[in-house]
Structure formats: structure tokens, C-alpha cells
Image (tube, rainbow, N blue to C red):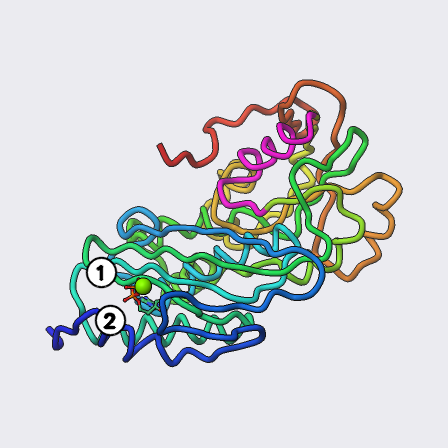
Amino acid sequence: MSKALGEFEIIRNYFARAPQGEGVALGIGDDCALLQAPPSGQLATSMDTLVAGRHFPADADPAMIASRALRVNISDLAAMNASPLWFTLALTLPSSDAVWLKKFAAGLLETAGQFGISLVGGDTTAGPLSITIQVIGHTQKPLRRDGASPGDSIYVSGPLGAAAAALPVVLAEREVSEAIRREAEQVYYFPEPQLTTATAIGKFATSALDISDGLLGDLIHICEASGVAAEVNLDALPIAPLVHQLAADNAIELAACGGDDYQLCFTVPEAAAGQINQLDLAAVPIGRLVQGEPQVRCSYRGRPWVAPSPGYRHF
Ligand code: ADP
Ligand code: MG
């Protein structure tokens, strides 16, 4: 066991010296941070909690936990076409383990540096391990869920299913080669927020969200918010290579229903589809929106296909 630290020592030693980026008038240390909003556009904010044993194994590498916690939050900014600015961290720790904290803070601040987002405050408490991050970003052209219309094409930004295929490996329920285990950890703990795609599609897209609970489970949210139905051709789904390596028999199910990939699902008017296809993106058209009650209808190899399991549900 390493030496136990108090709350203020934890803040001072690991978080208070986080680099202060753009727009931070006053960072960590006072009752509030003071932030200068950009002169135009809108601020976008979102929060996600990761609970040990539920969203990551409690004994996982702290730097990897930190990476995942921040990346999944930045993914929500990408889904809104917002660029990252600031974040706060609510950390609940079972004990003040200096070795764990050092690794966690290093992973967190490295990830923050990669995405140009500054830690500006937080809260530190004792309890079962849980990490809550709130992100704030800035957008000139928000991509909401309620802007889609019948006739729009549906796209996904890249390969699906990798995180669902990786999960049994990450949970040590399945033994694989060292190389595959590393790849599974990479996929699960270092999901790539689709900021570049969001910027590129911003002026064409009518709606977007990030796929955290599975494509079909998330696409229904666009249908409900926009009052449309979706027709998805599962033959068109881009399937991640890891799926073929780990779960080839369930490839379509993992790509359609597996969570945690953090690719974007977005819609564009038919007239703009040509322009999207010309962008240098991995995005793939997978279907279209039609008039009707909010629902997602799938076809696979020319037949209707019904998901064997719904998307991830918290309760
Ligand atoms: P208060 O008692 O006024 O709520 P705290 O003692 O909780 O303030 O926090 C002191 C300062 O340290 C605040 O600026 C707060 O935002 C920051 N802080 C606390 N915990 C963290 C953390 N885990 N990461 C970053 N900043 C933190
Ligand atoms: Mg205070």
C-alpha cells in the first residue's frame, strides 16, 4: 500500500497543475473556475460517469481508465460538432492510493493534451471507485438529433463492433494472444472521438449522435427526435477487423447492436450525399430515413432482420 493522502493533497499533487488552455481566466483552486466563452456560437456541455465493475474492471490500468473516461465524454462533443475546450472531474476513490493516482492523473492529462481540452476543476470524495467527467466545448454549427427528414441518407463514420468483440477480452473472460489482447484494450480504452468527421460533415448533416449503446439502439433516438422511420441495410455495415478475428459468427449482430464503438451515426439530405462521398472520410451510407412512426427496420441478405437483443440499457 502506498501512503494515504488527504483530499487537498490529492488535488494539489495530481490535478492542480493541469495546463490551463484557451479561455481559462481562473483554473483549479478557487470556488469556481472562470471561463471566457468564445464571442459567437454556442457552448455544448455533457457529462458521463464511469463506475468500476460496471463500465471498466476495478483493477484496470488507471491511465487507461482515465483515457476512456475522457474520450467517451469528448465523443459527445464530437457528436454535437463541438470542439473540446474545458472539463471538470468528479473523482470518487475507495482509498487515496498515490501510485494509482499518479498513473490516473498522467493518463488523464496526456489524453487532455492530445485533444486540447483543459481540466479546470472538480470534486474529490471517498467511496466506491467512480469517475465523472463533464466536458464543455464550442460549436458554430450544432448537430442535433431532431433535424433529420424523410429521404435523408443514414451514414456511420467508420467500422463497428470492435468494442463489443473486445469486451470479453477486456473482462478477462476470454484468453487470446498477447497481440489480440493489446488490440482489444486499445479499442476499449482508447476510443477515437470522431471530431474530424464531425467538422467535415457539419455543414451537410441534418442530425448526428455518437454510437455508445449500439447502432440500432442509438439510431432510434434520431428517429424519435426527428419523427421519422429508418431503413438500414445491414449488408452495408462496415465491420471492424477485430470482429472477424474474435466473433466472426456474430459479426452482424455485434456491428448492429454492440455498444462502445463511439463512431458517429449521422444523416444527410440525398442531394448532399455525393459531397459526403467525396470527402476523405471512412463514412459509409447504410440506409435512409422514410416517413412513418419512429422505428428502425433492418434488412440483411434481402430479408427483414430483427435484433436478437436490444441495445445496452443501464436499468
Ligand atoms: P469547494 O470546497 O469550494 O467545493 P473543493 O475543496 O472541493 O472546493 O475543491 C478545491 C478546488 O480544487 C476547486 O477549484 C475544485 O474545482 C478543485 N478540484 C477538486 N477536486 C478536483 C479534481 N479531482 N480534479 C480537478 N480539480 C479538482
Ligand atoms: Mg467552495
What's the mark number on residue 68?
A: none
Identify the residue shown where x is 47% and y is 48%.
Answer: 260
Magenta highlight: main SS: helix
Q: Does 147 lie within the magenta span?
A: no
Q: List the residue tagged with mark 1.
A: 93
Please tell me whether mark 2 sits on a helix, a strand or a loop.
helix
Please state the horizontal and vertical placement of residue 202, each as a whole percent of the image: 74, 54
Callouts 2 and 1 close, C-beta under 8 Å: yes
Q: Is residue 82 above or below residue 267?
A: below
The residue lying toward the viewer, choosing from 251 and 286, is 286
Q: Is residue 218 left or right of residue 111?
A: right
Which label lies toward us, 2 or 1?
A: 1
Identify the residue shown where x is 17% and y is 71%.
Answer: 6
Q: Is residue 30 left or right of residue 148?
A: left
**First-in-chain label (2 vs 1):** 1
Q: Does 222 lie within the magenta span?
A: yes
Q: List the residue tagged with mark 2.
A: 100
The residue lying toward the viewer, choosing from 177 and 214, is 214
Please tell me whether mark 1 sits on a helix, a strand or a loop.
strand
The span picked out in magenta is: 210-227
